[in-house]
Amino acid sequence: MVWLSEPDRGDAIKRAGAKPFEPTPGRGMREYVELPSGVIADAKALRGWLERGIAYVRTLPNKAAKQKS
């Protein structure tokens, strides 16, 4: 699975045959897609999707630190 931006998720589903990631049936993780085994077996293709995911994550704001109780 890889965490992608909305346009990249659509591209992955359309071009690479990815599907929305559902760790439990019916409970999908909105921003993640599951890449098919053909992409995982192709190092160049896999690297391209992982690089897109890394680029997207770098645009996200940092999480706020949790307060200690």
Image (cartoon, helix red, strand yellow):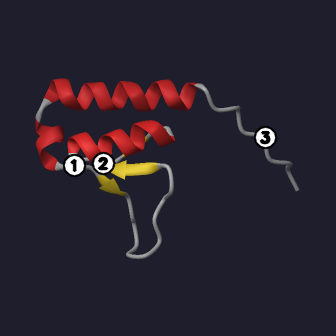
In the rendered structure, find residue 17 and report the number of the disc placed on it.
1
- Label 3 crowding class (10 Å Cα cut-off): few <14, some 14-19, many 20+? few
The residue at the point 14 percent across, 48 percent down is 37
**Image x and y of residue 26, in percent:** 43, 76
Mark 1 touching mark 2, by CB under 8 A? yes
Percent x, y of residue 62: 70, 32
- Kindly state the secondary structure of the residue where label 1 is placed: loop
Q: Which mark is residue 65?
A: 3
Q: Which residue is mark 2?
A: 13
Asked which secondary structure carries label 3, the reply is: loop
Sequence-wise, the earlier of marks 3 and 1 is 1
The residue lying at 17 percent from left, 23 percent from top is 44
Q: Nearer the viewer, mark 3 or mark 1?
A: 1
How crowded pointer 2 is (Cα within 10 Å; few <14, some 14-19, many 20+) is rated as some
Relative depth, front residue between 8 and 24: 8
Work out whether 61 lies above or below 68.
above
State the image coordinates of residue 54 (x, y, percent, origin top left).
Answer: 45, 27
Q: Which amino acid does the dot numbered 2 rest on?
A: Ile
The amino acid on which the numbered mark 3 sits, given as a three-letter code, is Ala
Q: Earlier in the sequence, mark 3 or mark 2?
A: 2
Q: How far, Cα to Cα, is label 3 from label 2?
A: 34 Å
Estimate the spatial distance between the alpha carbons at disc 1 and disc 2, rounded to whole Å.
Answer: 5 Å
